[in-house]
């Protein structure tokens, strides 16, 4: 007998959405230590399984902890002024080309200390956690110098120590061309490849590398160099691609075996096919579509046809998606992109976990890490149907009850 027996917790009579589908019958779910140890239909439950287990909850809807697989949560300042400018007719690209947009957040973020960035980012992280997130990806990309990119990544890692949440970090050095490199984009790309990526890899600060493949970002050829450097350092790949135009960034990412291509409003059939062949996840970002009042819809029907896995994320950032309410993303994915509630919820659990290279997460099945949410709703679809904060009754992180109402 171990000196401290593994704690056992039992949830009774819960409706389960397992990350892919809703289970037909009410279930009992047993967690032992950090893992899901048992899952039985209530009517087949043998009370012997409850031996030594504390009853942790009864009723409600149980989902995997939500996985927000694309955020820019760490930044200073805000861009409410640009929101107003856009409402007066300026476009996102015009503002960017005039030195605002991402570069405006870069100025504020460079001026902020690590502690100031922590203080600015924690309320946003807390908002995600209060709406069910147990894993969050956080990108750099508002530093654009070696020191400032590493500062952002360190802040992201520290956030994961300050709160019960898994943080996956992504180096997005190629987010925008910093002003000191104006007219010398290839030199900046060399800095990303030869200095930032090796440093982030050596310090264990980045799990993946992302690029913004776009007219106001970086060309496919530049992105390809960055992918090669990232691969040489064993880092996973992601891309912001086909958000505002079709440059073939998603197909390029797929060719390099990227985990995901994100945004993809302008993705064409060849791009969809390339992603299907490579197993690259399509990360849909309806918050950015909504805030930018875009009209070009991502090719959802083609993605379905080619069975490209679809994830849904908040893209929480100061410019295009200042929104930290993940269940609203499920709603927007349905209302704007016509996903089914099942697809949207799967997109925020199992498929999002795949987009992070963590297929062990985002599922309710025996053996999985016990990252779970218990919601006060009648059916999983309600999470996408209604927009309402405060429905989370319990959040369980790695087997521990970390939020209870
Ligand atoms: O995901 N498209 C590029 N990057 C972000 C926006 C960043 C910003 O505007 O600050 C996005 O939409
Ligand atoms: Fe983004």
Image (tube, rainbow, N blue to C red):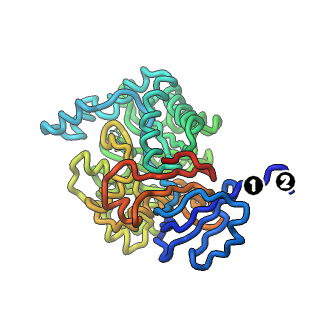
> In the image, what residue occupies the spot 35% across and 27% down?
77
Whether disc 2's CB lies below 8 Å from ligand 2 is answered no
Instruction: Report if the CB atoms under discs 1 and 2 are less than 8 Å apart.
Output: yes
Residue hosting label 2: 2
113 or 65: nearer the eye? 65
| Tag of residue 6 | 1
Q: Classify mark 1 as within 8 Å of ligand 2 or not, answering yes or no.
A: no
Q: Position of residue 81 (x, y in %)?
A: 23, 30
Q: Residue at x 80, y 50 (%)?
A: 4
* Residue that appears at 51% across and 40% down: 171
Quarter where residue 357 is shown: bottom right
Q: Residues within 10 Å of mark 1 (few under 14, many from 20)?
A: few
Separation of disc 1 and disc 2 at Cα? 8 Å
Q: Which numbered circle lies on residue 265?
A: none
Can you say whether 79 is above or below 19 in the image? above
The image position of residue 318, as x and y in percent, is: 34, 36
The answer to whether residue 258 shows anywhere in this view is: no
Under circle 1, the secondary element is loop
Q: Which residue is drawn at the image coordinates 37% and 68% (left, top)?
A: 303
């Amino acid at each position: 007998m171990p000196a401290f027996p593994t704690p056992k917790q039992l949830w009774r009579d819960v409706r389960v959405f397992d990350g892919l589908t809703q289970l037909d019958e009410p279930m009992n779910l047993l967690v032992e230590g950090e893992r899901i140890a048992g899952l039985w239909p209530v009517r087949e439950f043998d009370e012997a399984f409850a031996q030594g287990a504390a009853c942790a909850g009864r009723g409600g809807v149980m989902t995997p902890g939500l996985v927000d697989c694309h955020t820019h949560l760490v930044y200073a300042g805000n861009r409410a002024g640009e929101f107003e400018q856009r409402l007066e007719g300026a476009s996102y690209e015009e503002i960017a080309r005039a030195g605002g947009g991402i570069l405006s957040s870069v100025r504020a973020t460079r001026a902020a200390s690590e502690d100031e960035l922590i203080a600015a980012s924690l309320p946003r992280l807390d908002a995600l956690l209060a709406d069910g997130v147990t894993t969050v990806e956080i990108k750099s990309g508002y530093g654009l110098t070696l020191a400032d990119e590493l500062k952002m990544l360190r802040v992201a890692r520290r956030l994961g120590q300050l709160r019960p949440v898994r943080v996956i970090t992504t180096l997005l050095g190629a987010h925008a061309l910093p002003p000191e490199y104006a007219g010398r984009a290839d030199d900046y790309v060399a800095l990303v490849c030869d200095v930032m990526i090796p440093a982030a890899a050596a310090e264990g600060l980045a799990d993946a590398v992302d690029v913004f493949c776009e007219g106001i970002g970086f060309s496919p050829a530049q992105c390809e160099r960055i992918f090669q450097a990232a691969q040489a350092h064993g880092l996973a790949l992601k891309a912001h691609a086909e958000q505002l135009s079709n440059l073939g960034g998603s197909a390029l990412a797929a060719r390099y075996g990227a985990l995901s291509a994100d945004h993809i409003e302008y993705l064409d059939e060849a791009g969809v096919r390339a992603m299907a062949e490579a197993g690259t996840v399509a990360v849909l970002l309806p918050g950015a579509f909504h805030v930018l009042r875009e009209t070009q819809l991502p090719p959802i029907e083609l993605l379905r046809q080619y069975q490209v896995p679809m994830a849904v994320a908040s893209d929480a950032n100061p410019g295009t998606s200042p929104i930290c309410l993940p269940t609203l993303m499920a709603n927007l994915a349905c209302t704007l992109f016509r996903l089914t509630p099942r697809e949207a919820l799967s997109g925020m659990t199992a498929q999002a976990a795949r987009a992070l290279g963590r297929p062990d997460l985002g599922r309710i099945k025996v053996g999985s890490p016990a990252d779970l949410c218990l919601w006060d709703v009648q059916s999983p679809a309600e999470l996408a149907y209604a927009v309402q904060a405060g429905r989370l009754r319990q959040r369980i992180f790695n087997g521990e009850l970390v939020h209870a109402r």
